[in-house]
Amino acid sequence: MDRYPKVKKGLLRLQMPDPTEKQFVFPGWAMTHHLAWIILPLLVVGCSGEGSESPTAVSGVAPPPAQASVLWVHGTSLMRSETDGSGQVTLAEEPAMIENVVVSGVTVAYEVPQNKSNIGNVPRDTWVVRTDGTDRHLVLRSAVPQWLYLVDVIGSWVLYTDRTGPEYSPPPPSLASILVNGTAPRTLSAAVGSGELWQSPNYERQIMGRAVLEFAGNYFSVLPDGSDLQQLTVFPPFPHLNNETFTSLLGIRGVVGNAAIYATVQSPSSPVSAEGTPKLFAVPVVGGPVAKLGSGPDMEIFGVVVGSRVVYQQCVPRQLPNFDITFDRCDVMSVQGNGQGRIALTSTPEINYVQGAIGSQMIIRRSRSGGTPDNLVGVPVGGGKETPLLDLNPNNEFVSAIVADRILLRRPTGLWSLQADGGGLVQLTTNGSDWFSGAADDFACFDRSGALWCVPADGSGPATQVTANGRFVVGL
Protein backbone atom coordinates (compact mmCIF):
# COMPACT_ATOMS: atom_id res chain seq x y z
CA MET A 1 0.00 0.00 0.00
CA ASP A 2 1.36 3.42 -0.98
CA ARG A 3 2.51 5.68 1.85
CA TYR A 4 2.39 8.90 -0.15
CA PRO A 5 -0.51 11.06 -1.39
CA LYS A 6 -1.91 10.50 -4.82
CA VAL A 7 -4.55 12.03 -7.01
CA LYS A 8 -6.13 9.60 -9.42
CA LYS A 9 -9.30 10.08 -11.39
CA GLY A 10 -10.17 13.19 -9.41
CA LEU A 11 -9.42 11.77 -5.95
CA LEU A 12 -6.60 12.98 -3.73
CA ARG A 13 -5.76 10.41 -1.08
CA LEU A 14 -3.13 10.67 1.61
CA GLN A 15 -2.00 7.07 1.52
CA MET A 16 -0.69 5.98 4.88
CA PRO A 17 -0.56 2.21 5.42
CA ASP A 18 -3.61 2.00 7.66
CA PRO A 19 -7.09 1.02 6.53
CA THR A 20 -8.65 2.86 9.46
CA GLU A 21 -9.31 6.20 7.82
CA LYS A 22 -11.38 9.31 7.75
CA GLN A 23 -12.44 10.41 4.31
CA PHE A 24 -13.02 14.07 3.62
CA VAL A 25 -14.87 14.70 0.37
CA PHE A 26 -14.22 17.92 -1.49
CA PRO A 27 -15.95 19.16 -4.65
CA GLY A 28 -14.33 17.08 -7.38
CA TRP A 29 -11.78 15.32 -5.18
CA ALA A 30 -11.37 13.63 -1.83
CA MET A 31 -8.68 13.53 0.80
CA THR A 32 -8.27 10.42 2.88
CA HIS A 33 -6.38 11.06 6.07
CA HIS A 34 -5.24 7.73 7.45
CA LEU A 35 -4.77 7.72 11.17
CA ALA A 36 -1.32 6.25 11.63
CA TRP A 37 -0.52 2.85 13.12
CA ILE A 38 2.85 1.75 14.48
CA ILE A 39 4.35 -1.45 15.79
CA LEU A 40 7.16 -2.70 18.02
CA PRO A 41 8.79 -5.75 19.75
CA LEU A 42 9.34 -7.28 23.37
CA LEU A 43 7.05 -9.16 25.76
CA VAL A 44 6.06 -12.66 24.56
CA VAL A 45 2.41 -13.70 24.76
CA GLY A 46 1.24 -17.31 24.70
CA CYS A 47 -2.21 -17.88 23.21
CA SER A 48 -4.44 -20.24 25.12
CA GLY A 49 -6.95 -20.49 22.28
CA GLU A 50 -9.75 -19.77 24.75
CA GLY A 51 -10.49 -16.65 26.73
CA SER A 52 -7.08 -15.25 27.59
CA GLU A 53 -3.43 -14.93 26.66
CA SER A 54 -0.71 -15.01 29.29
CA PRO A 55 2.28 -12.74 28.61
CA THR A 56 5.74 -13.81 29.64
CA ALA A 57 6.68 -12.26 32.98
CA VAL A 58 8.76 -9.11 32.74
CA SER A 59 10.63 -7.72 35.73
CA GLY A 60 9.55 -4.32 36.98
CA VAL A 61 6.13 -4.40 35.32
CA ALA A 62 3.37 -2.79 37.40
CA PRO A 63 0.37 -4.88 38.50
CA PRO A 64 -2.49 -5.06 35.99
CA PRO A 65 -4.95 -2.14 36.07
CA ALA A 66 -8.45 -2.54 37.45
CA GLN A 67 -10.97 -3.79 34.91
CA ALA A 68 -12.73 -1.13 32.83
CA SER A 69 -16.23 -1.17 31.39
CA VAL A 70 -16.80 -1.48 27.67
CA LEU A 71 -19.92 -1.12 25.51
CA TRP A 72 -20.29 -3.48 22.56
CA VAL A 73 -22.84 -4.73 20.04
CA HIS A 74 -23.57 -8.32 19.11
CA GLY A 75 -26.06 -8.33 16.24
CA THR A 76 -29.39 -7.42 17.82
CA SER A 77 -27.95 -7.03 21.34
CA LEU A 78 -26.42 -3.95 22.97
CA MET A 79 -24.15 -5.09 25.80
CA ARG A 80 -21.96 -3.74 28.59
CA SER A 81 -19.26 -5.74 30.39
CA GLU A 82 -15.84 -5.53 31.95
CA THR A 83 -12.77 -5.74 29.73
CA ASP A 84 -12.27 -9.38 30.75
CA GLY A 85 -15.82 -10.26 29.65
CA SER A 86 -17.24 -10.52 33.16
CA GLY A 87 -20.29 -8.70 34.50
CA GLN A 88 -22.23 -8.74 31.22
CA VAL A 89 -25.40 -6.64 31.19
CA THR A 90 -27.85 -6.54 28.29
CA LEU A 91 -28.85 -2.92 27.68
CA ALA A 92 -31.14 -3.73 24.78
CA GLU A 93 -32.33 -6.73 22.78
CA GLU A 94 -33.98 -5.74 19.51
CA PRO A 95 -35.78 -7.63 16.70
CA ALA A 96 -33.32 -6.29 14.09
CA MET A 97 -29.65 -5.35 13.89
CA ILE A 98 -28.62 -2.48 16.15
CA GLU A 99 -26.95 0.33 14.18
CA ASN A 100 -25.43 3.77 14.61
CA VAL A 101 -24.79 3.74 18.37
CA VAL A 102 -24.10 7.17 19.92
CA VAL A 103 -22.94 7.56 23.54
CA SER A 104 -23.03 10.84 25.48
CA GLY A 105 -22.43 10.64 29.22
CA VAL A 106 -24.84 8.01 30.60
CA THR A 107 -27.14 8.20 27.56
CA VAL A 108 -26.87 5.65 24.76
CA ALA A 109 -28.88 6.26 21.58
CA TYR A 110 -29.11 3.78 18.72
CA GLU A 111 -31.10 2.95 15.60
CA VAL A 112 -33.06 -0.19 14.75
CA PRO A 113 -34.38 -0.86 11.22
CA GLN A 114 -38.13 -1.46 11.09
CA ASN A 115 -37.52 -4.22 8.54
CA LYS A 116 -35.63 -7.17 10.04
CA SER A 117 -34.02 -7.98 6.70
CA ASN A 118 -32.60 -4.42 6.54
CA ILE A 119 -32.66 -4.55 2.75
CA GLY A 120 -33.06 -1.38 0.75
CA ASN A 121 -34.31 1.95 1.98
CA VAL A 122 -35.66 0.87 5.37
CA PRO A 123 -37.13 3.29 7.94
CA ARG A 124 -35.30 3.28 11.26
CA ASP A 125 -36.42 3.94 14.81
CA THR A 126 -34.25 5.62 17.45
CA TRP A 127 -34.15 4.32 21.02
CA VAL A 128 -32.26 5.50 24.09
CA VAL A 129 -31.13 3.63 27.19
CA ARG A 130 -28.89 4.50 30.11
CA THR A 131 -25.47 2.88 30.40
CA ASP A 132 -26.69 0.93 33.44
CA GLY A 133 -29.42 -0.66 31.33
CA THR A 134 -32.35 1.32 32.75
CA ASP A 135 -34.90 3.67 31.17
CA ARG A 136 -34.91 2.17 27.67
CA HIS A 137 -37.56 3.85 25.51
CA LEU A 138 -38.42 4.91 21.98
CA VAL A 139 -37.56 8.49 21.01
CA LEU A 140 -38.11 8.66 17.23
CA ARG A 141 -40.20 6.52 14.93
CA SER A 142 -40.00 6.96 11.17
CA ALA A 143 -43.33 6.74 9.35
CA VAL A 144 -43.26 6.96 5.58
CA PRO A 145 -43.02 9.49 4.04
CA GLN A 146 -41.15 10.96 7.05
CA TRP A 147 -37.68 9.47 7.55
CA LEU A 148 -35.84 10.27 10.80
CA TYR A 149 -32.16 9.39 11.25
CA LEU A 150 -30.08 9.70 14.42
CA VAL A 151 -26.97 11.90 14.18
CA ASP A 152 -25.87 12.76 17.75
CA VAL A 153 -26.76 13.35 21.40
CA ILE A 154 -25.94 16.69 23.06
CA GLY A 155 -26.82 16.82 26.74
CA SER A 156 -30.53 16.01 27.08
CA TRP A 157 -31.18 16.43 23.33
CA VAL A 158 -31.15 13.88 20.52
CA LEU A 159 -30.19 15.35 17.14
CA TYR A 160 -31.54 13.81 13.96
CA THR A 161 -32.18 14.48 10.28
CA ASP A 162 -35.79 14.81 9.18
CA ARG A 163 -36.53 13.91 5.56
CA THR A 164 -39.91 13.88 3.88
CA GLY A 165 -39.87 11.68 0.80
CA PRO A 166 -37.57 8.97 -0.57
CA GLU A 167 -33.85 9.07 0.17
CA TYR A 168 -31.75 11.04 -2.35
CA SER A 169 -34.86 12.81 -3.59
CA PRO A 170 -35.91 16.41 -2.92
CA PRO A 171 -36.47 17.93 -0.55
CA PRO A 172 -33.22 17.13 1.30
CA PRO A 173 -33.33 16.58 5.07
CA SER A 174 -33.49 19.26 7.73
CA LEU A 175 -31.60 19.08 11.03
CA ALA A 176 -33.85 18.69 14.08
CA SER A 177 -33.71 17.83 17.77
CA ILE A 178 -35.91 16.28 20.43
CA LEU A 179 -35.54 15.80 24.16
CA VAL A 180 -34.23 12.41 25.29
CA ASN A 181 -37.66 11.72 26.82
CA GLY A 182 -39.22 11.99 23.34
CA THR A 183 -40.88 15.41 23.76
CA ALA A 184 -40.42 18.96 22.41
CA PRO A 185 -39.26 18.24 18.84
CA ARG A 186 -37.95 21.27 16.97
CA THR A 187 -36.11 22.19 13.78
CA LEU A 188 -32.58 23.50 14.16
CA SER A 189 -31.93 24.22 10.50
CA ALA A 190 -34.37 23.61 7.66
CA ALA A 191 -33.57 22.76 4.07
CA VAL A 192 -34.47 25.57 1.68
CA GLY A 193 -34.74 26.05 -2.06
CA SER A 194 -36.28 24.17 -4.96
CA GLY A 195 -35.31 22.20 -8.05
CA GLU A 196 -31.54 21.82 -8.33
CA LEU A 197 -30.90 24.69 -5.94
CA TRP A 198 -31.78 22.96 -2.68
CA GLN A 199 -29.55 23.79 0.29
CA SER A 200 -29.50 21.34 3.16
CA PRO A 201 -27.79 21.58 6.58
CA ASN A 202 -24.91 19.16 7.08
CA TYR A 203 -24.20 18.35 10.72
CA GLU A 204 -20.49 18.34 11.58
CA ARG A 205 -20.10 17.70 15.32
CA GLN A 206 -20.81 19.07 18.78
CA ILE A 207 -18.42 21.54 20.38
CA MET A 208 -18.93 22.98 23.86
CA GLY A 209 -22.53 21.80 23.95
CA ARG A 210 -23.36 23.37 20.59
CA ALA A 211 -24.22 21.78 17.26
CA VAL A 212 -21.84 22.89 14.49
CA LEU A 213 -23.19 22.54 10.97
CA GLU A 214 -22.43 23.55 7.40
CA PHE A 215 -25.20 25.26 5.48
CA ALA A 216 -25.07 26.95 2.08
CA GLY A 217 -21.28 27.14 2.09
CA ASN A 218 -20.80 28.49 5.62
CA TYR A 219 -20.44 27.18 9.16
CA PHE A 220 -23.00 27.89 11.87
CA SER A 221 -23.45 26.83 15.47
CA VAL A 222 -26.63 26.55 17.49
CA LEU A 223 -27.70 25.27 20.88
CA PRO A 224 -29.48 21.90 20.70
CA ASP A 225 -32.78 23.51 21.67
CA GLY A 226 -32.56 25.64 18.52
CA SER A 227 -31.65 28.92 20.21
CA ASP A 228 -28.66 31.24 19.81
CA LEU A 229 -27.86 30.56 16.16
CA GLN A 230 -24.42 31.96 15.27
CA GLN A 231 -22.85 32.28 11.81
CA LEU A 232 -19.16 31.39 12.12
CA THR A 233 -17.86 32.02 8.59
CA VAL A 234 -18.84 34.49 5.89
CA PHE A 235 -18.24 33.21 2.38
CA PRO A 236 -20.25 34.34 -0.66
CA PRO A 237 -22.87 31.95 -2.05
CA PHE A 238 -21.72 29.26 -4.46
CA PRO A 239 -21.52 30.61 -8.03
CA HIS A 240 -23.70 29.05 -10.68
CA LEU A 241 -21.44 29.77 -13.66
CA ASN A 242 -18.71 27.43 -14.84
CA ASN A 243 -15.11 28.21 -13.80
CA GLU A 244 -16.07 30.75 -11.16
CA THR A 245 -13.80 30.43 -8.13
CA PHE A 246 -15.40 29.81 -4.74
CA THR A 247 -14.38 28.56 -1.30
CA SER A 248 -15.22 24.96 -0.41
CA LEU A 249 -15.44 23.88 3.22
CA LEU A 250 -13.69 20.57 3.82
CA GLY A 251 -15.08 19.77 7.25
CA ILE A 252 -14.40 20.38 10.94
CA ARG A 253 -11.04 18.82 11.80
CA GLY A 254 -10.78 19.35 15.55
CA VAL A 255 -11.27 21.66 18.52
CA VAL A 256 -8.81 24.00 20.24
CA GLY A 257 -10.16 25.81 23.29
CA ASN A 258 -13.62 27.08 22.30
CA ALA A 259 -12.78 27.16 18.59
CA ALA A 260 -13.57 24.80 15.74
CA ILE A 261 -10.66 23.94 13.44
CA TYR A 262 -11.71 23.66 9.82
CA ALA A 263 -10.13 23.36 6.37
CA THR A 264 -10.96 25.13 3.12
CA VAL A 265 -9.89 24.95 -0.51
CA GLN A 266 -10.51 27.19 -3.50
CA SER A 267 -12.49 25.52 -6.30
CA PRO A 268 -12.19 24.98 -9.16
CA SER A 269 -8.38 24.92 -9.23
CA SER A 270 -5.46 22.60 -9.79
CA PRO A 271 -4.87 20.34 -6.76
CA VAL A 272 -1.19 21.36 -6.73
CA SER A 273 -1.74 25.10 -7.09
CA ALA A 274 -1.57 27.45 -4.11
CA GLU A 275 -5.33 27.98 -4.45
CA GLY A 276 -6.04 24.25 -4.69
CA THR A 277 -4.31 23.15 -1.50
CA PRO A 278 -6.23 22.80 1.80
CA LYS A 279 -5.72 25.54 4.40
CA LEU A 280 -6.51 25.41 8.13
CA PHE A 281 -8.42 27.99 10.19
CA ALA A 282 -9.97 28.23 13.66
CA VAL A 283 -13.09 30.14 14.72
CA PRO A 284 -14.86 30.37 18.12
CA VAL A 285 -18.08 28.36 18.10
CA VAL A 286 -19.95 31.29 19.64
CA GLY A 287 -18.71 33.56 16.84
CA GLY A 288 -15.68 35.76 16.60
CA PRO A 289 -12.58 36.46 14.51
CA VAL A 290 -11.22 33.67 12.31
CA ALA A 291 -7.58 32.70 12.91
CA LYS A 292 -5.42 31.49 10.02
CA LEU A 293 -3.34 28.62 11.39
CA GLY A 294 -0.88 27.96 8.56
CA SER A 295 1.22 30.10 6.26
CA GLY A 296 2.65 29.90 2.78
CA PRO A 297 1.44 28.04 -0.31
CA ASP A 298 1.84 24.45 0.93
CA MET A 299 -0.89 21.95 1.81
CA GLU A 300 -1.99 21.99 5.49
CA ILE A 301 -3.24 18.76 7.05
CA PHE A 302 -4.58 18.71 10.60
CA GLY A 303 -2.81 16.44 13.06
CA VAL A 304 -3.72 16.86 16.74
CA VAL A 305 -4.42 19.45 19.43
CA VAL A 306 -2.19 19.63 22.51
CA GLY A 307 -3.38 22.19 25.06
CA SER A 308 -3.66 25.52 23.28
CA ARG A 309 -1.53 24.43 20.31
CA VAL A 310 -2.59 22.95 16.99
CA VAL A 311 -0.16 20.54 15.34
CA TYR A 312 -0.44 19.98 11.61
CA GLN A 313 1.47 18.72 8.58
CA GLN A 314 2.73 21.21 6.01
CA CYS A 315 3.26 19.29 2.78
CA VAL A 316 4.67 20.12 -0.63
CA PRO A 317 2.54 18.38 -3.29
CA ARG A 318 3.78 17.56 -6.78
CA GLN A 319 1.70 16.49 -9.76
CA LEU A 320 3.06 13.50 -11.72
CA PRO A 321 2.78 13.08 -15.52
CA ASN A 322 -0.16 10.70 -15.09
CA PHE A 323 -1.95 13.34 -12.96
CA ASP A 324 -1.32 11.46 -9.72
CA ILE A 325 -0.17 13.58 -6.79
CA THR A 326 2.78 12.80 -4.56
CA PHE A 327 4.42 14.67 -1.69
CA ASP A 328 8.00 15.79 -1.99
CA ARG A 329 8.16 16.46 1.75
CA CYS A 330 6.01 17.09 4.81
CA ASP A 331 7.08 18.90 7.96
CA VAL A 332 5.23 19.04 11.25
CA MET A 333 4.23 22.50 12.47
CA SER A 334 2.89 23.75 15.82
CA VAL A 335 0.87 26.94 16.28
CA GLN A 336 -1.31 28.55 18.95
CA GLY A 337 -5.04 28.27 18.35
CA ASN A 338 -5.13 32.02 17.62
CA GLY A 339 -2.61 31.60 14.78
CA GLN A 340 0.32 33.05 16.74
CA GLY A 341 3.63 31.45 17.75
CA ARG A 342 4.02 29.20 14.72
CA ILE A 343 7.11 26.94 14.85
CA ALA A 344 8.45 23.99 12.87
CA LEU A 345 8.82 20.78 14.88
CA THR A 346 10.64 19.08 12.01
CA SER A 347 12.68 20.41 9.11
CA THR A 348 13.84 17.49 6.99
CA PRO A 349 13.50 16.45 3.32
CA GLU A 350 11.38 13.42 4.28
CA ILE A 351 7.67 12.84 4.93
CA ASN A 352 7.05 13.66 8.60
CA TYR A 353 3.59 12.70 9.81
CA VAL A 354 1.88 13.16 13.18
CA GLN A 355 0.97 9.92 14.96
CA GLY A 356 -0.41 11.41 18.16
CA ALA A 357 0.68 13.03 21.42
CA ILE A 358 1.52 11.84 24.91
CA GLY A 359 1.38 14.79 27.26
CA SER A 360 3.39 17.54 25.54
CA GLN A 361 5.42 15.05 23.52
CA MET A 362 4.54 14.76 19.84
CA ILE A 363 4.94 11.32 18.27
CA ILE A 364 6.05 11.67 14.64
CA ARG A 365 6.72 9.10 11.93
CA ARG A 366 9.43 9.93 9.39
CA SER A 367 9.18 8.10 6.08
CA ARG A 368 12.03 7.85 3.63
CA SER A 369 12.14 6.54 0.08
CA GLY A 370 14.41 3.77 -1.17
CA GLY A 371 13.25 0.99 1.14
CA THR A 372 15.00 2.34 4.24
CA PRO A 373 13.28 1.96 7.65
CA ASP A 374 10.91 4.65 8.84
CA ASN A 375 11.80 6.41 12.08
CA LEU A 376 9.50 7.05 15.02
CA VAL A 377 10.61 10.16 16.91
CA GLY A 378 9.37 12.32 19.77
CA VAL A 379 9.45 16.14 19.76
CA PRO A 380 8.07 18.58 22.39
CA VAL A 381 4.97 20.36 21.10
CA GLY A 382 6.62 23.72 21.78
CA GLY A 383 9.79 22.71 19.94
CA GLY A 384 13.02 21.25 21.22
CA LYS A 385 15.32 18.27 21.00
CA GLU A 386 14.17 15.32 18.94
CA THR A 387 14.19 11.91 20.66
CA PRO A 388 14.61 8.75 18.52
CA LEU A 389 12.05 6.14 19.60
CA LEU A 390 12.05 3.21 17.17
CA ASP A 391 12.72 2.19 13.58
CA LEU A 392 9.71 0.79 11.74
CA ASN A 393 9.30 -1.37 8.67
CA PRO A 394 7.57 0.97 6.17
CA ASN A 395 5.37 -1.84 4.86
CA ASN A 396 4.01 -3.67 7.88
CA GLU A 397 4.65 -1.79 11.13
CA PHE A 398 2.24 0.98 12.04
CA VAL A 399 1.06 3.17 14.93
CA SER A 400 -2.53 2.27 15.84
CA ALA A 401 -3.29 4.72 18.64
CA ILE A 402 -2.17 6.32 21.88
CA VAL A 403 -3.59 4.36 24.83
CA ALA A 404 -2.87 5.06 28.51
CA ASP A 405 0.21 7.17 27.73
CA ARG A 406 1.67 4.44 25.53
CA ILE A 407 2.12 4.14 21.78
CA LEU A 408 0.15 1.17 20.49
CA LEU A 409 1.76 -0.58 17.52
CA ARG A 410 0.57 -3.14 15.01
CA ARG A 411 3.18 -5.54 13.62
CA PRO A 412 3.07 -8.87 11.78
CA THR A 413 3.70 -10.54 15.16
CA GLY A 414 0.77 -8.89 16.94
CA LEU A 415 0.14 -5.75 18.98
CA TRP A 416 2.96 -4.05 20.88
CA SER A 417 3.27 -0.88 22.97
CA LEU A 418 6.02 1.62 23.71
CA GLN A 419 6.56 4.48 26.15
CA ALA A 420 6.88 8.09 24.96
CA ASP A 421 10.63 8.09 25.66
CA GLY A 422 11.22 4.98 23.54
CA GLY A 423 11.57 2.64 26.51
CA GLY A 424 9.37 -0.15 27.81
CA LEU A 425 8.77 -1.85 24.47
CA VAL A 426 6.41 -4.76 25.17
CA GLN A 427 4.51 -7.30 23.10
CA LEU A 428 0.82 -7.44 24.00
CA THR A 429 -0.47 -10.20 21.68
CA THR A 430 0.99 -12.78 19.30
CA ASN A 431 -1.72 -12.80 16.63
CA GLY A 432 -0.86 -10.77 13.55
CA SER A 433 -4.55 -10.34 12.65
CA ASP A 434 -5.31 -8.36 15.84
CA TRP A 435 -6.78 -4.98 14.91
CA PHE A 436 -7.18 -2.13 17.39
CA SER A 437 -10.83 -1.18 17.98
CA GLY A 438 -10.72 1.40 20.78
CA ALA A 439 -9.58 2.18 24.31
CA ALA A 440 -11.26 1.55 27.66
CA ASP A 441 -9.27 3.40 30.33
CA ASP A 442 -5.87 1.64 30.47
CA PHE A 443 -6.93 -1.17 28.13
CA ALA A 444 -6.51 -1.49 24.38
CA CYS A 445 -9.41 -3.40 22.87
CA PHE A 446 -9.06 -5.13 19.53
CA ASP A 447 -10.82 -7.30 16.97
CA ARG A 448 -9.58 -10.83 16.34
CA SER A 449 -11.51 -12.53 13.55
CA GLY A 450 -14.82 -11.10 14.79
CA ALA A 451 -14.12 -11.65 18.48
CA LEU A 452 -13.61 -8.68 20.82
CA TRP A 453 -10.55 -8.80 23.11
CA CYS A 454 -8.93 -6.31 25.51
CA VAL A 455 -5.42 -6.13 26.98
CA PRO A 456 -3.67 -3.75 29.42
CA ALA A 457 -1.78 -1.29 27.21
CA ASP A 458 1.37 -1.55 29.33
CA GLY A 459 1.49 -5.36 29.06
CA SER A 460 0.98 -5.82 32.79
CA GLY A 461 -1.71 -8.47 32.27
CA PRO A 462 -2.99 -10.98 29.72
CA ALA A 463 -5.24 -10.27 26.77
CA THR A 464 -8.76 -11.53 27.53
CA GLN A 465 -11.72 -12.24 25.31
CA VAL A 466 -14.72 -10.04 25.98
CA THR A 467 -17.03 -11.86 23.58
CA ALA A 468 -16.62 -14.38 20.79
CA ASN A 469 -18.68 -12.24 18.43
CA GLY A 470 -19.05 -8.53 19.05
CA ARG A 471 -18.22 -5.04 17.84
CA PHE A 472 -16.57 -2.48 20.12
CA VAL A 473 -18.55 0.73 20.63
CA VAL A 474 -16.81 2.70 23.39
CA GLY A 475 -15.02 2.39 26.71
CA LEU A 476 -17.13 3.64 29.61
Image (tube, rainbow, N blue to C red):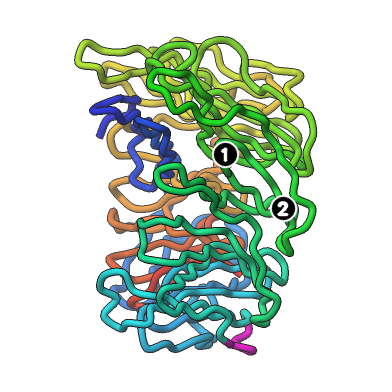
Q: Tell which of 204 and 317 is nearer to you.
A: 204
Residue pointed to by mark 2: 222
Residue 378, magenta (yes or no): no
Residue 211 sits above or below residue 306 on the image: below
Residue 240: x and y in percent read 44, 28
Residue 416: x and y in percent read 43, 49
Residue 83: x and y in percent read 51, 73
Residue 16: x and y in percent read 36, 34
**Neighbour class for label 2 at 10 Å: few (<14), some, many (≥20)?**
many
In this view, which residue lies farthest toward the left? Answer: 322
Q: Which residues are magenta?
A: 132-137
Q: Residue at x 37, y 82 (%)?
A: 114
Q: Tell which of 410 and 235 is nearer to you.
A: 235
Q: Residue at x 38, y 32 (%)?
A: 392
Residue pointed to by mark 1: 253
Q: Residue at x 57, y 27 (%)?
A: 312
Asked if the residues shown at circle 1 and circle 2 are in contact, with their CB atoms under 8 angstroms apart, the answer is: no
Asked where in the image residue 217 lies, by quadrant, the reply is top right
Looking at the image, residue 425 sits to the left or right of residue 5; the answer is: right
Residue 257 sits above or below residue 46 on the image: above
Q: Tell which of 258 and 237 is nearer to you.
A: 237
Quarter of the figure with the C terminus: bottom right
Looking at the image, residue 359 sits to the left or right of residue 249; the answer is: right
3D distance between C-alphas at marks 1 and 2: 18 Å
In this view, which residue lies farthest toward the front? Answer: 194
- Disc 1 marks a residue whose amino acid type is Arg
Residue 367 sits above or below residue 227 on the image: above
